[in-house]
Image: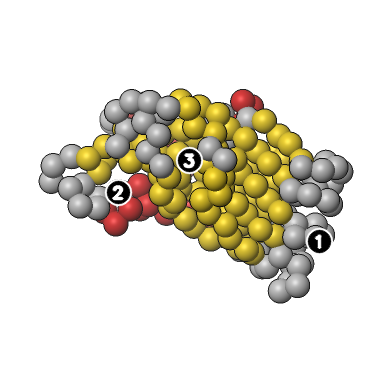
Amino acid sequence: MTHRQDEIEAIFRRIADLSEESLIQLSQFISFLKWQEEQWHSPSAWEPEGGLRPIWVYDLIEHFGEARQAATHDPAGMEIKVAPASCGGLVRQAIWQHPPAVGVSVLEYQFAVPHDVDVLKMRFAAGVRDGALLSSDNQVAFRVRVNGRILWSHLKGEVGWDSFILDLPSLAGQEAIVQLITDPLGNSRWNWAVWGEPQIIGLVYHQV
């Protein structure tokens, strides 16, 4: 029996001991892993003219402890942490970023981009956690700012995940400052905002 077969059998033994609730969560997580693999290998995502291949990944959840947290006014009501989040019944590892009652929440990352990167992208999902009672007159705004410039903004007034792949300036060999921003737009009630599996991806062109 191969080592891989041993690992698979060990996993099945552990699954057999799970409760029904845990099995549902496991199924949701497997669905996410499948989605993540499809996104990673998607030609439309990584292979425009000439083709691209990823060579570097900066995982924002992995580097969460290095990020700076700030509120533009009073931080009362703000909550920023890393934890699994269920949005529309799909669980993903996420950054929770509930904005403050007044002003906006900012989570700032600073890192160096490798010299050999040709294209820089950001892959993530923006979500509102299950149980939030948002509506058309009570939405939360998600924004991404890179080196002082807002590159992306998105409004959500309902629970669920929305997935994105965002083009960033290449910034090869430079310092990058990436800010995740959530804005309550004057009403922070039920603003259960989360960023699902956010990553910065460095790619290079290659011949197809």
What color scheme is it? secondary structure
What residue sits right under mark 3 in the picture?
199
Say which residue appears at 85% left-offset and 42% top-offset: 74
Q: Residue furthest bottom?
A: 136
* Nearest to N terminus: mark 2 or mark 1: 2
In depth, the one of 192 and 179 nearer the eye is 179
Quarter holding the N terminus?
A: top left
Question: CA separation, marks 3 and 1?
Answer: 29 Å
Relative placement, left or right, of 164 versus 105 is left
Q: Residues within 10 Å of mark 3 (few under 14, many from 20)?
A: some
Does the image show residue 70?
A: yes
* Nearest to N terminus: mark 3 or mark 2: 2
Say which residue appears at 58% left-offset and 60% top-offset: 154
What residue sits right under mark 1 in the picture?
187
Which three-letter amino acid code belongs to the residue tagged 3? Gln
Relative placement, left or right, of 167 versus 184 is left
Label 1 sits on a secondary structure element that is: loop
Picture coordinates of residue 206, whole percent (x, y): 18, 39
Which three-letter amino acid code belongs to the residue tagged 2? Trp
Indicate which disc residue 116 carries.
none
Indicate which disc residue 46 carries.
2
| CB contact under 8 Å: marks 2 and 1 | no
* Mark in the foreground, 2 or 1: 1
| CB contact under 8 Å: marks 3 and 1 | no
Picture coordinates of residue 176, whole percent (x, y): 49, 32
Say which residue appears at 80% left-offset and 60% top-offset: 186
Label 3 sits on a secondary structure element that is: strand
Picture coordinates of residue 53, whole percent (x, y): 26, 40
